[in-house]
Amino acid sequence: MKIRNYVILTFAGVFLVGCQTNHTKDSSLNKTFVYDNNENQSNEVTEEMSLPDKKIDFWDGKYAYEILASSEICLTNVEGEDNKEGISKKIKSSTIPVKATYKNKEYMVSRIGEGAFISCKNLNDLIMPDSVKEIDKSAFAYCESLKGITFSNELQRIGNGAFVFTSVAELKFGDKLSFIEEAAFSFCKSLKKVDLPESVKVIEKGAFSSCLNLQEVTIRARKLNMEEKVFVKCNSLKTFYVPKESIEYYKKALNEYKAEVKAIEE
């Protein structure tokens, strides 16, 4: 199964794009895309890529699920009727359910799987329940119309490239988020503001790279493990707001960027 896509990468390393399909066999991508660390070169790569098959244990309504444990499931696919190669052109808004039922048993939706909504180009709005704790790699990648996102208050991890090429303008998370992986929000060209909660502990390379209109980032954690090039090619970035007692720490941690470091305004 193959689909043609434009894959644009912004960090040294490998960025894998996946998708869920109606198969039960697990596999992995047979192509990877490696970023050339020369920032003066174009990063756009056109490739034909194979989509991995992912396990689907059952459908409930318009969503498919994999059973993770005795009471938890992972949402792995969307819109069975018009789904072509794991991609729904039909869905415009999604309120992810808290629970789904299979064989008269209820399961909690605790995770959104790899590529679950990938390239759902007409998806505008997303609401996820507080049961969701993790978002896997490429879950909403290339959802180019996605503007409104209500994150779970219990969300702890956002995976590699989870929201790459979406149209969100502002990001604010619950106070449980601790881990943001590589390229999670890269190439979100409408993004202007990011508010990171005190709970964030790790932000990986390129997490917000090439967000060309990003102007303001608030970091509420006193200290965190932030890799290089998190905000590379965010050319409009003007200000980092950080805790008053951590200004000197962040001036060093963020010295690769031209943006000013200021205390959070109470």
Image (spheres, rainbow, N blue to C red):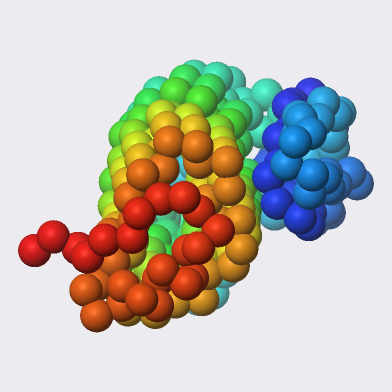
Write the residue at 31% across / 77% down.
246
Q: Picture coordinates of residue 78 (x, y %)? A: 53, 36
Tally of marks: 0
Q: Nearer the viewer, residue 108 or 204?
A: 204
Quadrant in the picture for residue 93: top left
Q: Give the left or right position of residue 247, taking residue 3 as reference.
A: left
Q: Is residue 52 visible?
A: no
Q: Relative to 144, is 128 above or below?
A: below
Q: Give the left or right position of residue 69, taking residue 45 as reference.
A: left
Q: Picture coordinates of residue 20 (x, y %)? A: 67, 43
Q: Nearer the viewer, residue 246 or 83?
A: 246
Q: Where, quadrant-wise, is the C terminus in this rendering?
A: bottom left
Q: Picture coordinates of residue 23 (x, y %)? A: 75, 45
Q: Relative to 164, is 198 above or below?
A: below
Q: Nearer the viewer, residue 22 or 199?
A: 199
Q: Give the left or right position of residue 182, taking residue 149 as reference.
A: right
Q: Nearer the viewer, residue 177 or 260?
A: 260
Quadrant in the picture for residue 27: bottom right
Write the residue at 47% across / 72% down.
252
Q: Is residue 195 visible?
A: yes
Q: Give the left or right position of residue 189, taking residue 227 as reference.
A: left
Write the residue at 91% across / 46% down.
30
Q: Picture coordinates of residue 141 (x, y %)? A: 58, 38
Question: Looking at this rendering, what residue extends furthest in the left direction?
Answer: 266
Write the residue at 40% across / 50% down.
259
Q: Where, quadrant-wise, is the N terminus in this rendering?
A: top right
Quadrant in the picture for residue 94: top left
Q: Relative to 206, is 79 above or below?
A: above
